[in-house]
Image (cartoon, coloured by chain):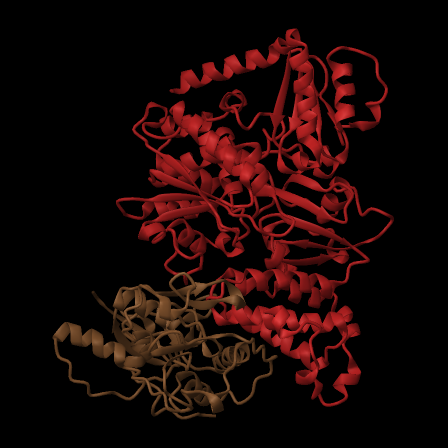
Amino acid sequence: MNRSDLHALGERELQKQSEARCRLLCCGSTPCLSSGGTAVQEVFKGFLKENRDLKAEVAVVSTGCMGPCSRGPLVTVQQPGEEDVIYERVTSELAQEIFKKHVTDEATDRVETHILPNDIPFFTKQKKVVLANSGLIDPERLEDYVAHGGYLALGHALREMTPEEVCNEIINSGLRGRGGGGYPSGLKWNLVRRAKADKKYVIANGDEGDPGAYMDRTLMESDPHRVLEGMAIAGYAVGAEQGFIYVRGEYPIAAKRLEKAIRMAERRGLLGSRVMDTAFNFRIDIRIGAGAFVCGEETALMASIMGKRGQPVPRPPYPPSSGLWGYPTLINNVETFGSIAPIIDNGAEWFAGIGTAKSKGTKIFALAGQVENTGLIEVPMGLSLREIVFDIGGGVPDGRTFKAAQTGGPSGGCIPADYLDTPVDYESLRELGSIMGSGGLVVMDDTTSMPNVAKYFMEFCMDESCGKCVPCRVGTVQLYRILDRITAGTATRNDLTIMEELCTMMRETSLCGLGQSAPNPLLSTLRYFREEYEALINDDLHATNGRFTLATPSTRSAKEVL
Amino acid sequence: MSVVTLTLNDELISANSDQSLLEVIREHDIYIPTLCHMEGLSERGGCRMCLVEVQGSRTLQAACVTEVAEGMVVTTHSERLRKYRRMTLELIFAERNHVCAVCVMNGHCELQAVAAIEGMDHVRFDYLHPDLPMDISHERFGLDHNRCILCTRCVRVCDEVEGAHTKDVLGRGINCRIINDLNQPWGSSQSCTSCGKCVEVCPTGALFRKGATVAEMVKRHDFLSWITSGREKNEWDYAGQAPYYATERRKE
């Protein structure tokens, strides 16, 4: 398939879509499906089965994520000449009413209360770049993606740009790694491009594991072709012919849709041999993880792809010089790859115009916790935390007050209410002792106990430590036990001292990012909410010269912890 | 191969560019503790004992997995490094049961020797002391998980030198265990050749010869280099060298 075929395919699809009298878009990503979205789709499809004559003019489309996940299942009704109507919390009964109202034009007043106005800040404050197609197209149909401008960027890059120009375009756009590290993507691409080797690889990291975060899953489920297109452009830019996309084992729908997308793209000549009738070959294979958080760390991920035990290896050498099977490897987050096609389409300047001086573009966040509108949002970098939590998120429910927001999952930290006006970008968050991370954003209200939060994340790290290096393997257990004592009120002041010392030691001596960043949630809650820890310290025990430190039993015995 | 110049503890030295930092440090008779490193095996970088400060590097670097580079400025001993080494040892001692008084390796143990040299005289963390089983199903050897520090020397020697790959690691984090084959009793292992290399390279009393009682188990720490050089030169005279830490005494 060359570029004119691609245009023709898109035109045909658009023509077909515009002929429909009514398009019922049902969210088909995991949150909506798990809250009853499957039944809603069945209702619509059942109606069409009964009224076969409607089939030509009504389309039921299973799309990707629409955003406000806590209000799911979501249905968007598109009718020519009218504005899209979004329905929230759709049940089977309500689906029948919606069908009646929009398709058979029967009067019904039961649906009005479920309409989600599309001029609320939740929608207007967002800027969709990576998720532009999410919720609008059917992720399982290549035609739908092409109709929305898909694979044009790949065609443009292959025909009109040299690999060097592609890399420079990415450098000029200021795109930084969306997995959390924030390393300039273009520089990484250039490193791999310049490396001399017989073979090179491209890897998309879709092993998202932070509690409460699901940006990558949604992107893979809602718009798999965009990730593939980004990877193919990367493959062309760095000179790789093989790509791997590493999907977390807990994401079966994402893996299924990616698999289907790869097959379809290969059939159409958009992947595989002689991509778009050029001399460029690029194959993509899926690798499914087996449930280890540490496999999101790049060296552990590569070990896992190679069939080895998923453990990190010390860097350097970094993947751009020696990665998969010792060959230069480009490894980026799926969201990073999702940003590539828009950059090539609209130019580096356009992308660099969004965001702040050092952090360009948009970032997807998974808004979770004690906030009115939980869901998936994409905002320009530099938006203040206040705007994200209160305008888009709708504030804290039940009349409670905002206490802190946790970003970056178990590697990140919390941001207290005093810093609500901080612009959300890589540097500002780092200064506050947190990180951008992959995009998890958990809002906590004033009922939350911060030592408990720290304990939760430490338990996560303890369970997910791979066990290779001593500071992480044993340090996380020791920190967890001290936190357990603190929250139980049986800790001494001595425990607090040891805890802080151990945190610093783990940060500096652990082998990989997991161990180095495991103390972050603890250190950041200690930094802003020290009084909560102090209040839980039992000074009576301290009065005995700390001799109780060893003798005080933990609330959980060693056996339970081990 | 080219020659590079680097600064090691304020002294200018030269080294071959394919050497690891640890090799260079040892070559210059500077004592630096290691637990998972063993000459003749692939490097792992897991015990974090050989961490050194490299100027310009964001994090501390494990000397065993760091290649020397031109102009590198390395510090092997500092107050910070000493403190971290001690803490790492504390964590190891707290992790499982390392009570020397009842150990077959008492007096010949690398962990014990390194702890004494580094001055780790007390443990401030909770002793986890999990109740782990022993595997004495093998005819000649025993495996005591309670003494294991998960250095994986046994795993590597079995795979890389003997070529059997009987041993591997099960589980993750604090639940890691050394296993034989697919987690079956050692004695029933079909791949084990009973060569005993794993026992000789084990730094603690986790792997031992049956019949040894407290403090009786002596391992040949240079066993592996003896085999590898023997294979190369076809000379099998065993002279025996003192371990790298033999003359090192605790310094304050």
* Residue at x 47%, y 30% (from the top left corner): A260
Left or right, B21 with respect to A207, comes to left
* Residue at x 40%, y 79% (from the top left corner): B76
Q: Position of residue B83 (x, y in %)?
A: 52, 81
Relative depth, front residue between A404 and A356: A404
Q: Position of residue A131 (x, y in %)?
A: 59, 34
Relative depth, front residue between A403 and A113: A113
Q: Colour of chain A?
A: red
| Residue B180, above or below A361 | below
- The image quarter containing residue A59 is top right
Left or right, A184 with respect to A483, comes to left
Looking at this rendering, what residue extends furthest in the top direction?
Answer: A53
Left or right, B106 with respect to A507, comes to left
* Residue at x 37%, y 72% (from the top left corner): B63
Looking at this rendering, what residue extends furthest in the left direction?
Answer: B234
Q: Position of residue B128 (x, y in %)?
A: 58, 77
- The image quarter containing residue B227 is bottom left
| Residue B38, above or below A45 | below
Screen quadrant of the N terminus of chain A? top left
Residue A348 seen by the camera: no
* Residue at x 80%, y 73% (from the top left corner): A535
Residue B151 seen by the camera: yes
| Residue A171, above or below A344 | below
Screen quadrant of the C terminus of chain A? bottom right
Q: Colour of chain B?
A: brown
Total numbered circles: 0
Q: Position of residue A204 (x, y in %)?
A: 46, 43
| Residue A175, above or below B213 | above
